[in-house]
């Protein structure tokens, strides 16, 4: 069956055409998703279902003058995968890396050593670290105080931890 018949059938919401579309393009859609997010089977299936639904619901936006049907479908799959990654990252809790765990669990780690390490950071990042890890503020509270969105705080802390880890040469792993 050619693409024009499949597109026409999908527009009419006819199941045999949807099945033919899945048989013909399912592998391409899955490959596009896997290329974007890797081999995460649970998430791939969810994104594939979202992609099929999006293609069916938005088939009218396909323009054969702009791209081939195959490329348009692969693009929808790719952007659905990117959306899923964004959604997942927004709901993901922050995993505290070994540097933070060792700093907080090391009984021999003095206040002077902490201050020396924090001097490696910018003034603003140093203050964020003090409030979070020494004074015990939550990310929510710190976000309100500093007027920095919580996701940006997570990013800054993560980058600062990486910076400390590099500058300390993995000493506190």
Image: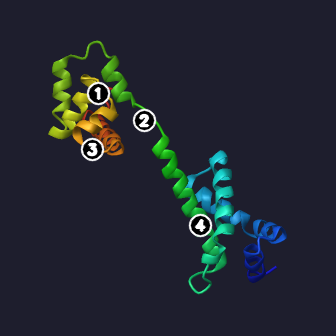
| Sequence-earlier tag: 3 or 4 | 4
Q: CA distance from mark 2 to mark 4?
A: 29 Å
In the rendered structure, find residue 137 and report the number of the disc placed on it: 1
Q: Secondary structure at mark 4?
A: helix
Q: Which residue is mark 3?
A: 148
User: Is 159 left or right of 89, judged from the image as shown?
Assistant: left
Q: Earlier in the sequence, mark 1 or mark 3?
A: 1
- Dot 2: what SS? loop
Q: Residue furthest top?
A: 107
Q: Residue at x 60, y 82 (%)?
A: 63
Q: Secondary structure at mark 1?
A: loop
- What is the distance, in whole Å, between disc 2 and disc 1 at their CAs? 15 Å
User: Residue at coordinates 25% horizontally, 32% vertically from top-left?
Assistant: 129
Reading the image, the residue beneath label 2 is 94
Q: Are marks 2 and 3 in contact (CB under 8 Å)?
A: no
Q: Secondary structure at mark 3?
A: loop
Q: Residues within 10 Å of mark 2 (few under 14, many from 20)?
A: few
Q: In the rendered view, would you say 108 is above or below 147?
A: above
> Is 77 left or right of 126, judged from the image as shown?
right
Q: Which mark, by number, is residue 76?
A: 4
Q: What's the CA distance linking mark 4 and mark 1? A: 41 Å
Question: Which residue is rendered at x = 26% and y = 13% of the image?
Answer: 108
Sequence order check: which comes first, mark 2 or mark 3? 2
Q: Crowdedness of circle 3 by 10 Å Cα count: few (<14), some, many (20+)?
A: few
Estimate the x, y position of residue 53 in percent, counting from the top left.
Answer: 68, 62
Task: Give the image quarter of residue 101.
Answer: top left
Q: Are marks 2 and 1 in contact (CB under 8 Å)?
A: no
Q: Earlier in the sequence, mark 2 or mark 4?
A: 4
- How far apart are the two marked residues, 2 and 3, measured between alpha carbons? 17 Å
User: Which residue in the rendered view is the most extreme toward the bottom?
Assistant: 65
Closer to the camera: disc 2 or disc 1?
Answer: 1
């Amino acid at each position: 069956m050619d693409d024009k018949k499949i597109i026409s059938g999908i527009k009419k919401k006819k199941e045999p055409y949807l099945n033919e579309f899945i048989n013909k393009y399912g592998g391409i859609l899955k490959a596009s998703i896997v290329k974007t997010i890797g081999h995460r089977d649970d998430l791939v299936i969810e994104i594939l279902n979202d992609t099929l639904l999006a293609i069916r619901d938005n088939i009218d936006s396909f323009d054969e003058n702009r791209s081939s049907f195959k490329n348009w479908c692969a693009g929808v799959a790719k952007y659905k995968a990117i959306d899923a990654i964004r959604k997942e990252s927004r709901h993901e809790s922050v995993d505290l890396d070994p540097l933070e765990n060792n700093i907080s669990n090391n009984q021999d780690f003095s206040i002077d050593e902490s201050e020396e390490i924090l001097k490696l950071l910018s003034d603003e990042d140093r203050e964020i670290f003090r409030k979070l890890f020494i004074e015990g503020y939550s990310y929510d509270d710190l976000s309100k105080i500093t007027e920095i969105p919580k996701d940006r705080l997570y990013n800054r802390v993560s980058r600062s931890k990486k910076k400390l880890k590099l500058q300390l040469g993995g000493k506190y792993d």
